Image: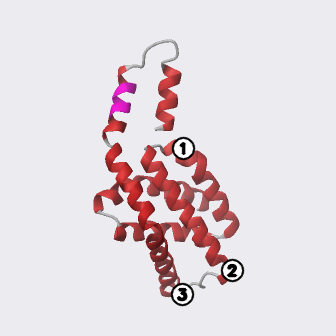
Amino acid sequence: MITLLETLIEGAEGTYANAQDLRSLEHLMSSWSERKDTYLAVESKEKTIIDRAMVLLHENQALSGNQPIDKSRVELCRRDITLALRYYALGMLLQDEEMLKDRFIYWQKNVIQAMGLHHYQGVKFVFKALCEELSKEQAELLKPYFKLGQSMIMTDLN
Protein backbone atom coordinates (compact mmCIF):
# COMPACT_ATOMS: atom_id res chain seq x y z
CA MET A 1 0.00 0.00 0.00
CA ILE A 2 2.76 2.42 0.94
CA THR A 3 4.71 1.62 -2.22
CA LEU A 4 1.56 1.84 -4.34
CA LEU A 5 0.60 5.19 -2.80
CA GLU A 6 4.12 6.56 -3.28
CA THR A 7 4.05 5.44 -6.93
CA LEU A 8 0.60 6.96 -7.40
CA ILE A 9 1.68 10.27 -5.87
CA GLU A 10 4.89 10.45 -7.91
CA GLY A 11 3.16 9.44 -11.14
CA ALA A 12 0.32 11.89 -10.69
CA GLU A 13 2.50 14.85 -9.80
CA GLY A 14 0.96 17.80 -11.59
CA THR A 15 -1.63 15.60 -13.31
CA TYR A 16 -4.28 12.98 -12.55
CA ALA A 17 -3.60 9.37 -11.60
CA ASN A 18 -3.74 7.02 -14.55
CA ALA A 19 -6.37 4.30 -14.94
CA GLN A 20 -3.98 1.44 -14.03
CA ASP A 21 -2.98 3.13 -10.76
CA LEU A 22 -6.62 3.73 -9.90
CA ARG A 23 -7.46 0.05 -10.60
CA SER A 24 -4.56 -1.06 -8.38
CA LEU A 25 -5.75 1.19 -5.59
CA GLU A 26 -9.32 -0.01 -5.98
CA HIS A 27 -8.16 -3.65 -5.79
CA LEU A 28 -6.15 -2.85 -2.68
CA MET A 29 -9.10 -1.23 -0.98
CA SER A 30 -11.52 -4.03 -1.91
CA SER A 31 -9.58 -6.57 0.17
CA TRP A 32 -8.96 -4.26 3.14
CA SER A 33 -11.58 -5.82 5.42
CA GLU A 34 -10.24 -9.37 5.03
CA ARG A 35 -6.64 -8.23 5.47
CA LYS A 36 -7.52 -6.18 8.55
CA ASP A 37 -9.40 -9.11 10.12
CA THR A 38 -6.45 -11.41 9.43
CA TYR A 39 -4.03 -8.91 10.93
CA LEU A 40 -6.16 -8.63 14.07
CA ALA A 41 -6.43 -12.44 14.30
CA VAL A 42 -2.63 -12.73 14.16
CA GLU A 43 -2.31 -10.08 16.83
CA SER A 44 -4.79 -11.77 19.16
CA LYS A 45 -3.25 -15.23 18.67
CA GLU A 46 0.40 -14.16 18.58
CA LYS A 47 1.46 -15.87 21.83
CA THR A 48 -0.21 -19.15 20.86
CA ILE A 49 1.34 -19.03 17.38
CA ILE A 50 4.82 -18.30 18.71
CA ASP A 51 4.57 -20.92 21.46
CA ARG A 52 3.46 -23.51 18.90
CA ALA A 53 6.24 -22.51 16.50
CA MET A 54 8.82 -23.00 19.26
CA VAL A 55 7.41 -26.47 20.03
CA LEU A 56 7.54 -27.37 16.34
CA LEU A 57 11.12 -26.11 16.12
CA HIS A 58 12.20 -28.17 19.13
CA GLU A 59 10.42 -31.26 17.79
CA ASN A 60 12.11 -30.82 14.41
CA GLN A 61 15.50 -30.47 16.08
CA ALA A 62 14.94 -33.71 17.99
CA LEU A 63 13.63 -35.64 14.96
CA SER A 64 16.43 -34.52 12.68
CA GLY A 65 19.11 -35.35 15.24
CA ASN A 66 20.35 -31.76 15.27
CA GLN A 67 21.61 -30.14 18.41
CA PRO A 68 18.81 -28.34 20.22
CA ILE A 69 18.99 -24.58 20.27
CA ASP A 70 21.34 -23.39 22.98
CA LYS A 71 19.27 -22.15 25.91
CA SER A 72 20.90 -18.74 25.70
CA ARG A 73 19.59 -18.38 22.15
CA VAL A 74 16.04 -19.60 22.74
CA GLU A 75 14.82 -16.16 23.84
CA LEU A 76 16.63 -14.49 20.95
CA CYS A 77 14.97 -16.91 18.57
CA ARG A 78 11.58 -16.28 20.19
CA ARG A 79 12.08 -12.51 19.91
CA ASP A 80 13.14 -12.70 16.27
CA ILE A 81 10.33 -14.99 15.16
CA THR A 82 7.83 -12.77 16.97
CA LEU A 83 9.22 -9.79 15.10
CA ALA A 84 9.02 -11.78 11.85
CA LEU A 85 5.38 -12.66 12.46
CA ARG A 86 4.56 -9.01 13.12
CA TYR A 87 6.32 -7.76 10.00
CA TYR A 88 4.85 -10.43 7.73
CA ALA A 89 1.40 -9.58 9.09
CA LEU A 90 2.06 -5.87 8.47
CA GLY A 91 3.24 -6.60 4.93
CA MET A 92 0.00 -8.50 4.33
CA LEU A 93 -2.13 -5.77 5.93
CA LEU A 94 -0.57 -3.09 3.76
CA GLN A 95 -0.29 -5.48 0.81
CA ASP A 96 3.25 -4.19 0.34
CA GLU A 97 6.06 -6.60 -0.48
CA GLU A 98 8.57 -3.82 -1.11
CA MET A 99 8.05 -2.35 2.35
CA LEU A 100 8.45 -5.83 3.83
CA LYS A 101 11.72 -6.37 1.96
CA ASP A 102 13.14 -2.97 2.81
CA ARG A 103 12.13 -2.79 6.45
CA PHE A 104 12.43 -6.39 7.57
CA ILE A 105 13.66 -9.13 5.24
CA TYR A 106 17.06 -7.56 4.58
CA TRP A 107 17.53 -7.12 8.34
CA GLN A 108 16.35 -10.68 8.94
CA LYS A 109 18.91 -12.07 6.48
CA ASN A 110 21.69 -10.33 8.37
CA VAL A 111 20.48 -11.68 11.72
CA ILE A 112 20.25 -15.20 10.35
CA GLN A 113 23.75 -15.02 8.95
CA ALA A 114 25.10 -13.67 12.24
CA MET A 115 23.08 -15.83 14.64
CA GLY A 116 22.71 -19.08 12.75
CA LEU A 117 20.06 -21.00 10.91
CA HIS A 118 17.90 -21.64 14.00
CA HIS A 119 16.27 -18.25 13.59
CA TYR A 120 15.32 -19.03 10.01
CA GLN A 121 13.97 -22.43 10.98
CA GLY A 122 11.90 -20.74 13.65
CA VAL A 123 10.32 -18.49 11.04
CA LYS A 124 9.47 -21.55 8.92
CA PHE A 125 7.62 -23.01 11.87
CA VAL A 126 5.79 -19.75 12.54
CA PHE A 127 3.90 -20.22 9.28
CA LYS A 128 3.09 -23.84 10.15
CA ALA A 129 1.80 -22.74 13.55
CA LEU A 130 -0.11 -19.90 11.96
CA CYS A 131 -1.87 -22.36 9.64
CA GLU A 132 -3.02 -24.31 12.70
CA GLU A 133 -4.38 -21.22 14.46
CA LEU A 134 -5.97 -19.18 11.68
CA SER A 135 -8.59 -20.00 9.09
CA LYS A 136 -7.40 -21.34 5.75
CA GLU A 137 -8.39 -18.07 4.08
CA GLN A 138 -6.39 -16.03 6.58
CA ALA A 139 -3.33 -18.25 6.19
CA GLU A 140 -3.60 -17.89 2.41
CA LEU A 141 -3.49 -14.10 2.73
CA LEU A 142 -0.22 -14.36 4.69
CA LYS A 143 1.37 -17.11 2.61
CA PRO A 144 2.87 -14.92 -0.16
CA TYR A 145 4.72 -12.80 2.39
CA PHE A 146 6.21 -15.80 4.16
CA LYS A 147 7.16 -17.31 0.79
CA LEU A 148 8.83 -14.07 -0.26
CA GLY A 149 10.90 -14.01 2.91
CA GLN A 150 11.80 -17.68 2.58
CA SER A 151 12.91 -17.36 -1.03
CA MET A 152 15.01 -14.25 -0.38
CA ILE A 153 16.65 -15.72 2.69
CA MET A 154 17.35 -19.14 1.19
CA THR A 155 18.86 -17.54 -1.90
CA ASP A 156 21.53 -15.90 0.25
CA LEU A 157 22.08 -18.90 2.55
CA ASN A 158 22.71 -21.41 -0.25
Of the numbered discs 2 and 3, the one sitting upstream in the chain is 3
Q: In the rendered view, would you say 62 is above or below 101?
A: below
* Label 1 Cα neighbours within 10 Å, binned few <14 / some 14-19 / many ≥20: some
Which of the two discs, 3 and 1, sits closer to the camera? 1
Circle 2: is it few (<14), some (14-19), or many (20+) Cα within 10 Å? few
Residue 51 x %, y % = 48, 76
Q: Measure how far apart labels 3 and 1 are at the Cα level.
A: 37 Å
Looking at the picture, how far across and down is residue 114, in whole percent?
A: 70, 65
User: In the figure, is residue 87 to the left or right of 137?
Assistant: right
What's the CA distance linking mark 1 and mark 2? Answer: 31 Å
Point out which mark residue 99 bears.
1
- Residue named by callout 2: 72
Please name the predominant secondary structure of the magenta segment in the image. Answer: helix
Mark 2 residue type: Ser
Residue 155 lies in magenta, yes or no?
A: no
> Residue at point 46% right, 66% down?
46
Residue drawn where x is 51% and y is 12% of the image: 14
Residue drawn at (33%, 28%), measured in percent from left and top?
23
Q: Name the residue that disc number 3 marks.
A: 65
Q: Earlier in the sequence, mark 1 or mark 2?
A: 2
Q: Is residue 143 above or below residue 17?
A: below
Q: Amino acid at mark 1?
A: Met
- Hey, which quadrant is residue 41 in on the image? bottom left
Can you say whether 70 is above or below 129 in the image?
A: below
Q: Kindly identify the amino acid type of the residue bearing the numbered disc 3.
A: Gly
Residue numbers of the magenta segment:
21-26
User: For this rendering, which residue is in front, 151 or 132?
Assistant: 132
User: Camera-side residue: 117 or 157?
Assistant: 117
> In the rendered structure, does residue 22 fall within the stretch colored magenta?
yes
